[in-house]
Image: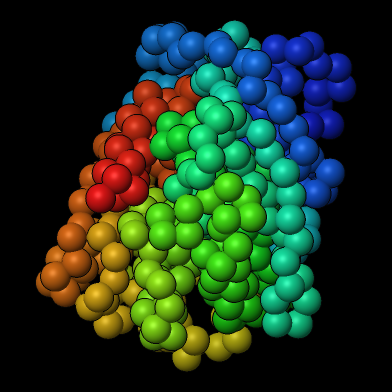
Amino acid sequence: MYSNTFIKNSFTVFTTTALMLLAACGNNNTNTTATDSTNTGSMKTDMTDKPRDLKPANPKPAWGKDLTDPMAVVIEKLGSYNAPPLTSISAQEARKQPSPADAAMAVMTEHNIPAPSNNVDTSGKDIPVAGGQIHLRIYTPKTGKEAYPVIVYYHGGGWVIADLNTYGASAEGLANQVDAIVVSVAYRQAPEYKFPTAHNDSYAAYEWTVKNAASIKGDPKRVAVVGESAGGGLAAAVSMMAREKGFQLPVHQVLVYPIAGYDFNTPSYKESDSTKPLGSGLMKWFFEKYLKSAADGKNPMIDLVNANLKGLPPTTIIAAQYDPLRSEGAMLSDNLKKANVNTTYKIYNGTTHEFFGMAAVVPEAKDAQAMAASELKSAFNK
């Protein structure tokens, strides 16, 4: 959810192994273009069961008594940075604070946990959008195929913070596990760019990808969308926009703890005053930064749970237990099924918002990525 500026300054010297860990866990250098051309394909380190041996040093927080031990270790590490609450600072300052990805990376380093195997190259592409341009990071498998299925990926951060690097572990993991090209989208963010800018940028990136898939070794007939948090909501909105425009629909959508509503009275919102890394107050702060007014919260692209969901592509929804967005994710799943959309839903108990990209540290994240990869591969092979 956050920027990596804080933690990267704490590590002034890296060995080759440490650099590999950074690549796998999402080093959030804010200069996305400069870090696009990388080659980590020679890294073949296998996962071990070592994350299951992680134990927090202190009692688990009152709000998270049932956190898994590895998840609790990451949350404990995040808390150790003593960063100010994001709601107390500006969006610009919030982007500089330590992130859950930073914490996971530090846990990997401290416990000598190897990174997942990686066999993709990355490159960058700027594309025009209304009023400017946005950047795409393209992850391409090195498995020698003439054409690959394509995943258009939308990162989280409440439309306000984080960037391609913060969520690099998720995009890279999907590229490797699905053997697909992943196009990760750097949509413009609030408060500099209000609703619906991020949504329109996200759709523009999807349409560009379909129309230009062949130029990046992609199969234009096999394009899916995936997103986390705000990105999950964006992915679903992109499918809705494609439907409304009569454009090619994604073959599948994976929505990981998506922002899917504007109701602060759901059970999970009421339970999440203190949850980390995302609590109810921070979600309200994100909405205040992105929406022009409360009326925008009722727009179908924001209020997905009450939108017309008919005709959307088959959907996979992944949820976390300790997350203000948990209730609306379950409601979205139910409403998709009522709209006759083939939908798979799974909640991972003992986890928090942002767990999905932590496959190297949190076993549930490894399972969730494998589930998403399996659903995507099935969709691409139909």
Residue at image point 56% right, 57% down:
213
Front one among 191 and 313: 313
Q: Can residue 166 be seen?
A: no
Residue 36 spot, x, y in % from top left: 75, 42
Q: How many marks?
A: 0
Q: Position of residue 246 (x, y in %)?
A: 39, 83
- Above or below: residue 232 compared with residue 137: below
Q: Picture quarter containing residue 4?
A: top right
| 155 lies above or below 358 | below
Q: Nearer the viewer, residue 213 or 324?
A: 213
- Vertical position of residue 377 compared to residue 127: above or below: above
Residue at horizontal 73%, vertical 73%? 128
- Report the front residue among 176 and 336: 176
Q: Residue at x 34, y 74 (%)?
A: 304
- Residue drawn at the location 67% of the way across and 49% of the way down: 137
- Pick out the residue farthest to the right: 12
Evaluate whether residue 269 shows in this view: yes
> Which quadrant would residue 298 be assigned to in this image?
bottom left
Is residue 84 shown left or right of residue 67?
right
Where is residue 289 drawn, in percent x and y? 63, 73
Residue 60 in the figure: left or right of residue 371: right
| Colour theme | rainbow
Q: Position of residue 114 (x, y in %)?
A: 56, 13
